[in-house]
Amino acid sequence: RKVREEDDDDDDGTYRSCAHVLPMVNEVGQASALQQLRDDGIIDQPRSGGSADQYRWWIPKLHAERHPSLLSFYGLGGGNSATNSGNSRRNNSSNNNQELHRHQLADLFHRPTNWATYCTHVSTNNCTLDDGIAARPPHDAIESNQYHHRDAYIGHFRTTEKNDCASRPNDCTGHMVNVPCSWGNYAVPQAFHLGIAVESDGGLVPNGGYGYTESIEIYAAANATGSNVLMYWWEPDSLIESYRGTDYEFVPIHLPLPTTECVNNRVSQEDRCSANFTLQVGSPMGSCDAGPVPMVVSMALKQCDHGDFASCSPAYAALQSYQVTNYDFQQIYKYRNDAPNNDGRLAVCRWFAENLDDIRQTIVPLTYPRQRRVESFYRPLTYFSITLAAASLVCVTICAFLTAKKYNKTKVMRYAQVDFLLMILGGLFFVALAALFYSLEPSNGVCVCRQWFVAVGYSLELVPLAVKVAA
């Protein structure tokens, strides 16, 4: 399906090319559009590409070992009663647990502090002296907003009024590093409906999310200071791989398993970014963990107009066999982190070389390797072209002979000037000869003769006519 160019102000009908393959497509909010594309025969049935690219809740391994209850939503559930049900005794017990969980989260997960805020609100000397956290004040606006600087600011986590459960026993919260609402983000509805008392305090509205660089800096600050941190991030990703094997290795938190009903009730991107909190959290039925994201393939790759299957494009068959797991992606990310300048191409080539045998057995279609099938260049239409070119040569030759020998003394020929007529006939002879070469199987000599005889032939044919007309 063609898509009109977004910057096509002239509306002249130009279109930009569409992709044949989308390796990861989030169906939330566009399930009906994808179904329409399937009904129209534009795309194939979405299927998994082997990897489970998904957003999850994470804490560092060091703190998972200290607080193993945090590894499940059962150990995090607090503050909200949206999921509570049962008799009065069970509700009373649940409320007590909620209060305990809320206080625990507020006590564990403090707010990250950027460089400028630390210098103005926390440092006793406004960062004029190195206090082991900040070696100096930030130099510019970019440094002011940083949460971690390798050489001059290791980062800091502090409690705010939001962490103060003594003064706010019913709405104190711990901190979570959330991402922008426009990403595949379900942290807000998950926290609300599962009763997990955490919120993000980033500068992005409406969910308080942090940008990509800010999130990475906050996790680096937690690693540098040994602080607790709760993060919403996706896998597979190079950030997860960069901390593997360390105390701050990413450990996932288990939320309710995804189901078809849950996926169909997830909050759409429009509602996630709404200023209306009720729309942001959506239905409780959509608060499960993230599931795998399918791959979408254009039906154009499946179409084959040739009778011989081996003559068709192998792309569709290769994509049907395409399976690259999270483990494979994480291995590639590890190679990239180890490569000079984080060279992604070098990492992919290394992984490809190490897994070449498996790739040959799984991804390479059955029609490969192909065998060369030699077919004759000469077919009925080719022979007809040769015959027509030869007949033209004979006709031109006969006309030239008659003009030069038999009718050269006649008055008409003298007035027409025989020399000019012979030059025109010579040009036509060369053009007919070029037509003969165009009917022969291509080779270096044949291709050169085609160009030369056409150029020389038309020159000899047209120049005398131009001279006579000018005269």
Image (cartoon, helix red, strand yellow):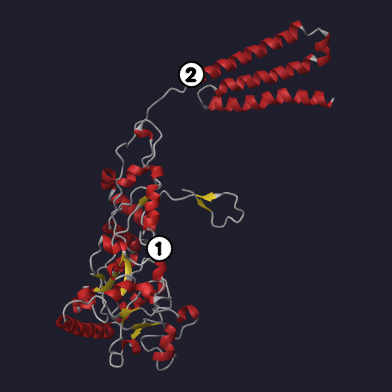
Q: Looking at the image, which residue is at 46% across and 83% down?
A: 138
Q: Position of residue 192 (x, y in %)?
A: 30, 76
Query: How would you rate the neighbour count of disc 1 (Cα within 10 Å): few for under 14, some for 14-19, many for 20 or more?
Result: few
The residue tagged with tag 1: helix, strand or loop? Answer: helix
The furthest residue to the top: 406
Residue 110 in view: yes
Q: Quadrant of residue 195?
A: bottom left
Q: Quadrant of residue 228?
A: bottom left
Left or right: 264 in relation to 414: left
Q: Quadrant of residue 454?
A: top right
Query: How would you rate the neighbour count of disc 2 (Cα within 10 Å): few for under 14, some for 14-19, many for 20 or more?
Result: few
Instruction: Identify the residue position indicated by label 2 in the image.
Output: 380
The furthest residue to the left: 89
* Label drawn at residue 341: 1
Q: Amino acid at mark 1?
A: Asn
Residue 216 in view: no
280 in relation to 468, above or below: below
The residue tagged with tag 2: helix, strand or loop? Answer: helix
Q: Position of residue 86 (x, y in %)?
A: 17, 77
